[in-house]
Image: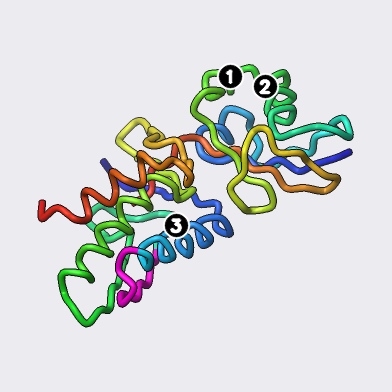
Amino acid sequence: MRWLDYEAYAPLAVRSFERIADEARQRWPDVRLAIHHRSGRVDVGEASVVIAAASPHRADAFGAARYAIERIKQITPIWKHEHFDGGDTWIEGATADPDDEIARQLAMERACSSR
Amino acid sequence: MFVTVKLFAKLREIAGAGEVRLGLADNAVVRDAWLTLQARYAGIAPYASSVSCAVNADYSRMSAPLREGDEVAFLPPVSGG
């Protein structure tokens, strides 16, 4: 791969981050989250997402951060466009449905396991 | 009524436009906007079962009613992170 381009529907992406932070607050009331995602060109090896979690207890911070990244992948309207020598491809993952309780539960299970 | 439709990623590429203005019946719902688009850009049809939607930059449903001037967004499966 040569580089990535991220395309975002920015106003809804920001709303999705607020929604994810609200969901995390229900499970970890003492955790405060800050979520950032790059858009546009991102070179190989560069970070595309920053999630900062502040908490009195480290396990809660790690759990909430893990939950946030899982939910971003499920519902945030951002698309990854991979560029190769001689071609490119859009990556398509989850159908974005914030009310899909099964997906939300899966994100919570991943956040609450140590793996 | 007229609505503005925003398309992203592969959907935008297939349609050749990130923003499309659509004339719809006054009682139209989001699904009507999708079907109208599909009639114009047949290549988007494979996304009918995986696309999701937003109205005025908030998550919505295909059954949601539309109003004059709404911004409808169709979202192919997402891949952030």
The reply to whether the magenta stretch includes residue A28 is yes
Relative placement, left or right, of B52 versus A23 is: right
Identify the residue shown where x is 36% and y is 47%. Answer: A104
Specify whether residue A45 is painted magenta.
no
Q: Which residue is mark 1?
A: B45
Left or right for A41, reference B44: left
Residue under the image location 33 percent in, 59 percent down: A68
Q: Is residue B57 left or right of residue B28?
A: left
Of residues A74 and A87, the one nearer the viewer is A74
Tell me the SS state at disc 2. Answer: helix
Question: Residues at badges 2 and 1 in contact (C-beta under 8 Å)?
Answer: yes
- In the image, farthest residue toward the left: A114
Q: Which residue is mark 2?
A: B38
Q: Which residue is mark 3?
A: A39
Colour scheme of this structure image?
Answer: rainbow
Q: Residues within 10 Å of mark 2 (few under 14, many from 20)?
A: some
Vertical placement of residue B50 versus A33, above or below: above
Helix, strand or loop at label 3? It is: loop
Residue B34 placement (x, y as % from top left): 68, 28
* Residue positioned 52% across, 19% down in the render: B46
Q: Residue at x 22, y 82 (%)?
A: A56
